[in-house]
Image (cartoon, helix red, strand yellow):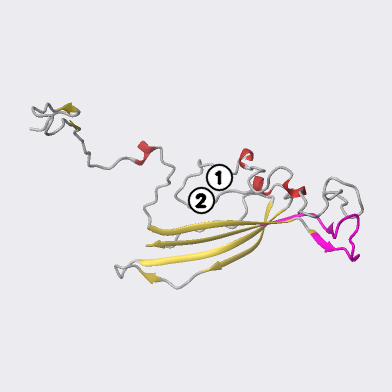
Amino acid sequence: MPPPANQIINNPNPAAEPQTNVTAATVTIGEVPIEDQNAKVVENSDGVDVEYLVRSRYEFDGRRHMLGISSPGGFLNKSVAFVQLSAPTLLWLASWTAARIGRPPDVPDPVSQDPNWVLLDVIPEVPQMVLARDGVSAWYRISATYVYGHQAPGSNVFALMQFPKPPWIDGSVPRVIPADAIKPDILMGAGGGQQAAPGVPPNPNPVGGGGDFWTPW
């Protein structure tokens, strides 16, 4: 008969073989209800999802353009000028692919749920059907890209972004990027944008900090 859990076995000859701790394990075989794990899953017994991938791409265009100054020696210690020809624009390209065995997969509704995002294009693609390994069940796959434009994008693109989710994750999972997650020192150190290269004098009128003709903002 095995010893009780965590019982120290007395060894009559400890010099030859040290005493050890023996831990008894209990294994329970059975189904654990998903509610017991505080899961964020939406159960679906209608078909088998084999793939669901959603990608969101955002394209912010500040409508600023860099122009080379025609004077060979530059102007006010600058060799380029920046001009803004219109207000900024923001595009959201949502691309997704879904596949399911048994019936067609759930499809994201392209109708915008936010009046600030205006639907511009819907580009779906449906390849031919195939059969699963059982030779009976149909395998459905569909892909699409939705293009939206924002009415008032502003300058902080991350405030308008959301993480996409598949249908089996419920809506309680956070999907936005918090403001404190945007770190200014990850790409550039303090003052990194104004440090001149060796042998090059510093810019006396940095963009946003001066008032000459070539940097109106």
Residue 81 part of the magenta-drawn span? yes
User: Could you tell whether 86 is left or right of 60 in the image?
Assistant: right
Q: Quadrant of the N terminus?
A: top left
User: Could you tell whether 189 is left or right of 177 in the image?
Assistant: right
Q: Whole-Å distance between the Cαs marked 2 and 1?
A: 8 Å
Q: Residue 129's x, y, as percent? A: 42, 71
Identify the image quadrant of residue 183: top right
Q: Residue 27's x, y, as percent? A: 21, 39
Name the foreground residue: 66 vs 148. Answer: 66
Q: Amino acid at mark 1?
A: Arg
Mark 1, residue position: 175
User: Could you tell whether 112 is left or right of 97 in the image?
Assistant: right
Name the foreground residue: 47 vs 159. Answer: 159
Mark 2 packing: few (<14 Cα in 10 Å), some, or many (20+)? some
Circle 2: element type: loop
Label total for image: 2
**Which comes sooner in the sequence, label 2 or label 1?**
2
Identify the image quadrant of residue 70: bottom right
Q: Residue 216's x, y, as percent? A: 88, 51
Residue contact between numbered discs 2 and 1, judged by CB atoms under 8 Å: yes
Task: Please give the name of the residue rendered at 74% of the width and 44% of the height, measured from the top-left corner.
Answer: 191
Q: Amino acid at mark 2?
A: Lys
Mark 2, residue position: 165
Q: Which residues are magenta?
A: 65-91
Q: Residue 159's x, y, as percent? A: 66, 45
Name the foreground residue: 215 vs 161. Answer: 215
Residue 192 vertical placement versus 3 (above, below): below
Task: Please give the name of the residue rendered at 87% of the width and 63% of the height, measured from the top-left corner.
Answer: 69
Residue 128 vertical placement versus 88 (above, below): below
Task: Please give the name of the residue rendered at 18% of the width and 33% of the height, measured from the top-left corner.
Answer: 24
Circle 1: element type: loop
